[in-house]
Image (cartoon, grey):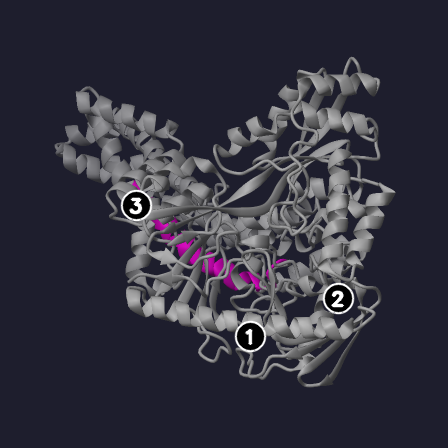
């Protein structure tokens, strides 16, 4: 396990360095000049040149990269071209919205999808089993912004129970307000996420239900519940965990649509604003942090899978690879 | 002449002061008799324009003007919501005989938010900041006439111009007076206005607190929070759920019905200065031909376009000048909608069978809608329009910088921007030696009457020449909770004075 961890961490570090090179180069290939975002429509060439100098976009690319990477290595994400604010605290502030939003939606989605998926599989021949499958199928087709608008219309505009959007300016210093403003966004993401998860849980459960080992366990006298708990759940969770990892990672930045519908100052909207303003340090900062998060989530998903599934452990630590 | 002018200014000062005093008495008495409004209210303002940073000489954008102009920062003069220029931090000023030297006397007892007293050195610093090499102020080119700034004493600023500029005082209303010792102006502030910056949470909100040591009348509310939204639906939802009290400018008429028929809200139809232009490249074929431009202008039914975009809001203009500019004249009859005339003009210009051109269209509203409409209108007179959709960045480089276009769509937001037609190097390349001369003479005029007369002449000529096609003037729609009063209706040049806003408890 120790060697595996080391190897995995080294892989993580190399991936990060490679990713940062790629995203730096790709960004510079975008058309347009960040100096344009800083200058007004009446700006002359000398004003644009001054803007370029002030943000350093007039220097050669390798120099810009080493400068950025040097900062990065010392834990500094740089300073925004446009606002002059340091990017690090800005990203942290956005993570304060995005991480609770994503995690809460993730947990809620699991709480909905696992029992629903199980029921849809186990009772697939009953009307409610079929209904569950149908609803989840439909759920995959529902655009997230549309669901958001419906929820806002029902719970904010008509019932007036929850805010229609926004996040308190004091953030988590006003916990009740912060939580209230996240309820609808969390439900929106969770519903859409659980729709696809139900499909995965259902098919994983179906595999298990038809498996030989479950039949053997039952034949050896275990009750259905015990057999399912000891053998079924473990086996069913292996493919679901990797799907969960992917879902979680994509929600981190994919929440941008929900953030826009609910006017939340999250990571995705910071990225969107950064892109329209050609604010390279902000874009790089957000993408770097999210790359890191995605790699970490993948790493954790692997780890959890190994804990759940002893077969993976023995095969790899035995040096088979 | 100079004496007369000085005394004239002195007289207006007295008049203005007495008006201010009456207004003061008036408002306080109406306030106490009503007794309903809350002196310590928090006013929540919803907006789509978050500042990019807090410095208006470093690309802060429209949002920074909206939030900070007049609220946090003040100029020597201010542009009122009706378009008049009033003295603010300048208590008085004198203009020399030759019109080249302006002597400003500063108001007493003005303090910056940091506590420092306002002196002439701060004014000099602030003006120089706008004029600096690295300044990105939109007013830099207008203020280039400033040759020398002297500060004979702490209360007096003497500005010498290289040539006469009747708009100088007006342009000064855009120059924020900033503490010369202030640092980090992109993220903090040190102005003299009725509010201090409390907190700016990027991506979400910017809040202002009433400044206790303000030199003038204290703000009518204790706290103002600008809430920023990325889309109009979220903004209108916030207004519907009372998360915000007022929306600085509605961008589409679609959402207005829910407020119009609701007694809890008031929909205000103010005057805007934003014009939608079909701008021709007046130097390139075929639009270097006046008749072709006139034909295109006459072939497009602006009224129908306006109605399809804005319903019953907004208005038609026949020129670059909106009604709030002092030299406005109704020129909607010049090159009015007339398909027959358009066809005749095209034939005269040698385009009996029409022609084809590419219309560079910014990819955001309302340009794509307008482009499609123009395409179908011009098809009726035999002109084929190829719509080329571009981003605002591309527009800036291709059209504005390189003049590499045949025709384009663009919104022009500023007031008093007719003057661009006097600059043959501007992106649309309109070059008429009379208009150029009149606009130059107007700037060097000695009286506003002369200035107005000359600009009216220039405006009529550009309209007759169809220098561009001015499709329509945007409406300025402010929707507010009916608990609110005293908010600005016109929001000229994107400013939004919050200090008079009263909120019922």
Pointer 2 or 1: first along the chain: 2
Q: Position of residue B451 (x, y in %)?
A: 75, 55
* Quarter of image, res B447: bottom right
Q: Residue at x 65, y 25 (%)?
A: B337
Question: What chain is tagged by disc 2?
Answer: B
Q: Position of residue B380 (x, y in %)?
A: 66, 15
Q: Quadrant of residue B376?
A: top right
Residue B5 visible in the picture: yes
Question: How far is mark 2 from mark 1, CA to CA?
Answer: 21 Å
Which residue matches tag 2?
B131
Question: Taking B312 as reference, is B245 left or right?
Answer: left
Query: In the rendered image, which residue does mark 1 sit on?
Result: B192
Q: Which residues are magenta?
A: A82-109
Q: Chain of mark 1?
A: B
Residue A142 counted in the magenta span? no
- In this orientation, which residue lies closer to the viewer: B461 or A132? B461
Q: Are marks 2 and 3 on the same chain?
A: yes
Instruction: Write the residue at 53% across / 53% down.
Output: B491
Tell me the tag on residue B473.
none
In magenta segment, residue A89: yes
């Amino acid at each position: 396990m120790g060697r595996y961890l080391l190897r995995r961490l080294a892989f993580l570090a190399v991936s990060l360095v490679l990713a940062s090179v790629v995203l730096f180069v790709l960004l510079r290939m975008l058309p347009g000049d960040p100096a344009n975002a800083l200058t007004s429509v009446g700006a002359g060439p000398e004003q644009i040149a001054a803007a370029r100098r002030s943000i350093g976009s007039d220097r050669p690319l390798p120099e810009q990269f080493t400068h950025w990477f040097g900062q990065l290595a010392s834990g500094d994400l740089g300073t925004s071209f446009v606002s002059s604010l340091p990017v690090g605290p800005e990203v942290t502030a956005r993570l304060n919205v995005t991480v609770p939003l994503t995690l809460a939606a993730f947990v809620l989605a699991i709480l909905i999808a696992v029992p629903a998926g199980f029921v849809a599989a186990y009772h697939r021949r009953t009307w409610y089993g079929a209904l569950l499958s149908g609803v989840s199928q439909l759920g995959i087709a529902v655009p997230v912004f549309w669901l958001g608008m419906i929820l806002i219309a029902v719970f904010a505009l008509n019932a007036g129970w929850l805010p229609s959007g926004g996040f308190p300016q004091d953030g988590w210093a006003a916990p009740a307000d912060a939580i209230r403003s996240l309820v609808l966004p969390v439900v929106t993401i969770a519903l859409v996420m659980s729709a696809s998860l139900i499909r995965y849980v259902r098919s994983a459960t179906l595999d298990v239900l038809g498996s030989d080992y479950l039949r053997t366990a039952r034949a050896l006298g275990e009750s259905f519940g015990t057999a399912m708990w000891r053998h079924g759940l473990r086996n069913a969770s292996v493919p679901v965990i990797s799907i969960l990892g992917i879902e979680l990672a994509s929600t981190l930045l994919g929440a941008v649509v929900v953030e826009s519908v609910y006017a939340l100052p999250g990571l995705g909207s910071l990225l969107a604003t950064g892109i329209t303003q050609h604010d390279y340090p902000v874009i790089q900062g957000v993408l770097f942090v999210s790359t890191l998060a995605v790699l970490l989530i993948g790493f954790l998903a692997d780890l959890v899978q190994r804990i759940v599934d002893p077969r993976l452990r023995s095969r790899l630590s035995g040096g088979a690879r | 002449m100079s004496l007369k002018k000085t005394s004239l200014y002195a007289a207006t000062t007295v008049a203005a002061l007495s008006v201010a005093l009456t207004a003061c008495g008036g408002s306080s008495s109406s306030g106490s008799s009503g007794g309903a409004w809350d002196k310590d209210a928090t006013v929540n303002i919803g907006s789509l324009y978050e500042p990019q940073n807090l410095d208006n000489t470093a690309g802060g954008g429209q949002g920074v003007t909206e939030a900070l102009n007049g609220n946090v920062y003040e100029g020597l003069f201010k542009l009122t919501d009706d378009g008049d220029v009033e003295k603010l931090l300048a208590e008085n000023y004198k203009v020399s005989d030759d019109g080249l030297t302006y002597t400003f006397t500063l108001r007493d007892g003005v303090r910056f938010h940091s506590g420092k007293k306002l002196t002439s050195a701060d004014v000099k610093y602030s003006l120089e900041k706008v004029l600096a090499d690295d300044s990105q102020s939109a007013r830099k080119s207008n203020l280039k006439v400033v040759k020398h700034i002297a500060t004979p004493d702490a209360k007096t600023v003497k500005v010498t111009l290289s040539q006469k500029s009747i708009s100088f005082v007006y342009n000064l209303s855009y120059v924020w007076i900033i503490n010369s010792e202030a640092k980090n102006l992109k993220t903090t502030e040190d102005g003299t206005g009725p509010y201090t910056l409390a907190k700016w949470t990027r991506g979400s909100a910017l809040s202002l607190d009433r400044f206790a040591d303000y030199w003038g009348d204290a703000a009518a509310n204790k706290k103002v929070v600008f809430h920023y939204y990325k889309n109009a639906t979220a903004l209108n939802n916030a207004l519907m759920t009372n998360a915000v009290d007022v929306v600085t400018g509605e961008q589409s008429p679609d959402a207005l019905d829910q407020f119009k028929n609701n007694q809890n809200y008031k929909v205000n139809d103010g005057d805007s200065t934003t014009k939608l232009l079909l701008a021709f490249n007046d130097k390139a074929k075929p639009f270097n031909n006046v008749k072709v431009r006139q034909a295109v202008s006459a072939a497009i039914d602006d009224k129908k376009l306006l109605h399809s975009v804005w319903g019953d809001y907004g208005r038609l203009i026949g020129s670059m000048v909106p009604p709030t500019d002092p030299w406005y004249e109704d020129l909607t009859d010049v090159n009015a909608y007339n398909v027959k005339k358009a066809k005749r003009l095209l034939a005269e210009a040698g385009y009996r069978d029409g022609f084809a051109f590419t219309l560079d269209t910014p990819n955001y509203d309302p340009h794509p809608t307008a482009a499609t409409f123009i395409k179908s209108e011009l098809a009726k007179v035999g002109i084929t329009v190829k719509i080329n959709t571009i981003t605002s960045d591309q527009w800036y480089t291709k059209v504005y910088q390189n003049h590499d276009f045949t025709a384009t769509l663009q919104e022009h937001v500023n007031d008093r921007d007719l003057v661009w037609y006097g600059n043959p190097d501007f992106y649309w390349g309109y070059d008429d030696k009379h208009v150029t001369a009149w606009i130059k003479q107007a700037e060097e005029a000695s009286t506003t009457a002369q200035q107005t007369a000359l600009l009216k002449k220039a405006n009529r000529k550009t309209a007759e020449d169809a220098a561009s096609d001015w499709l329509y003037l945007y409406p300025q729609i402010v929707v507010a909770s009916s608990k609110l009063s005293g908010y600005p209706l016109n929001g000229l040049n994107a400013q939004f004075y919050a200090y008079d806003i009263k909120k019922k408890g």
